[in-house]
Amino acid sequence: MPLLKNTYRAPGIFKNSHVASIYASAFRRVEFHFSTRQRIELSDGDFLDLERTFFSPNNNKVLILLHGLAGNANRPYMRGMAKIFYENGWDIASMNFRSCSGEINRLYRSYHAGATEDLQTVIDVLKVENKYAEINLIGFSLGGNLLLKYLGEQSKIASEIKSAVAVSVPCDLGASLNELNKSHNFLYSRRFLKNLKKELRLREAHFPSEIDKKDIAGCNSLLAIDELYTSKAHGFKSAAHYYRQCSCLAFLPGIQTPTLLINAENDTFLAPNSYPIQLAKNSKNLYLEIPKQGGHVGFIQHKKPYYHEERALEFIKRKSVLTPT
């Protein structure tokens, strides 16, 4: 039943998915800054950093944000969402996944699309330190996959977690990688590959016994990166095993928290099964919205907030009380 009507219409040239995606990623400017950084110590001896902003002392609600592949807490899409929620009374905890805050993490492993244990630690710390009565979650792309997997794999979600939103999510990691490797996505895949190889070269300098420069240089695709590093460093047998174990698609039926998934129909990163229409129709908790335009996190409007930011705020404020089709 929760298949939602959509009112978004991209203005002018932003009807083109590539223009929308590139502009939102490379040219958008958001006038918002976090006030402090909080380091979270993890149980395996590693750490990750949160960018924090507090609406008021003793505020009782917080928004946790999760970024995408090769991103960080200060990407425009992260600050845009932080800004609209902060202005409406939320404290903000914007996650930098391991190694994404400008300082390499302590362990050879880093982050991946299914590392839900790190999100759990952040939630546990905020519950204890800030005693929030309401925790809301928003994830983008890879971070959206991680979020949806987290919500679906838990037998019992903390009562403080009231709702969640996921935007531009590759629900099947392997299938979406195949889409990203197509010729019309060449610029994106090359950019991801360049950034990830740069990260691996930095990791090789700190862990020379774990990874070799020649192997890094030989990686000519995202699949090769996942075969060489992502899978092996995080306990998976292969890239295919990593994709199977961590794709959120298999976990969506288990979601018990009101959750909105916004995936644009013209998002060239996404495979067809990233639009789980029948599953949403049969779910009480998973709300699916498929705008015709918007590209990958590029839901641009004539006004400064993007469509997905206003929609996320509306959904979370109303705790999923929206009109199904």
Image: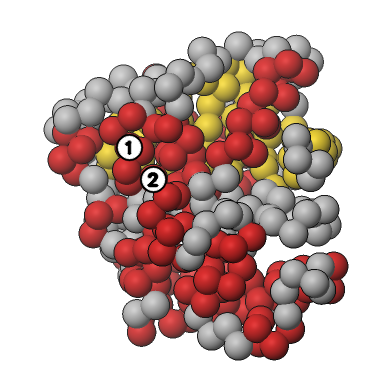
**Cα distance between the residues tagged 1 and 2:** 6 Å
Camera sees residue 133: yes
**Which disc, if any, is residue 248?**
2
The spot of residue 301 in percent (x, y) is 42, 52
Left or right: where 214 falls relative to 150: right
Front-most of 228 and 294? 228
Classed neighbour count for the residue bearing mark 1: other residues with Cα under 10 Å, few (<14), some (14–19), many (≥20): many
The spot of residue 120 in percent (x, y) is 61, 31
Front-most of 78 and 128? 128
Determine whether the residue tagged by mark 1 lies in a helix, strand or loop: helix
224 versus 24 height, above or below: below
Left or right: where 114 falls relative to 65: left
221 versus 11 height, above or below: below
Quadrant of the image containing the N terminus: top left
Quadrant of the rendered image containing residue 271: bottom left
Amino acid type, mark 2: Cys
Classed neighbour count for the residue bearing mark 2: other residues with Cα under 10 Å, few (<14), some (14–19), many (≥20): many
Determine whether the residue tagged by mark 2 lies in a helix, strand or loop: helix
Q: Which residue is disc 1 drawn over?
A: 252
196 versus 164 height, above or below: below
Quadrant of the image containing the C terminus: top left
Left or right: where 222 falls relative to 17: right
Camera sees residue 303: no
Amino acid type, mark 1: Leu
Front-most of 230 and 237? 237
Quadrant of the rendered image containing residue 124: top right
Identified at 20% across, 38% down, the residue is 279
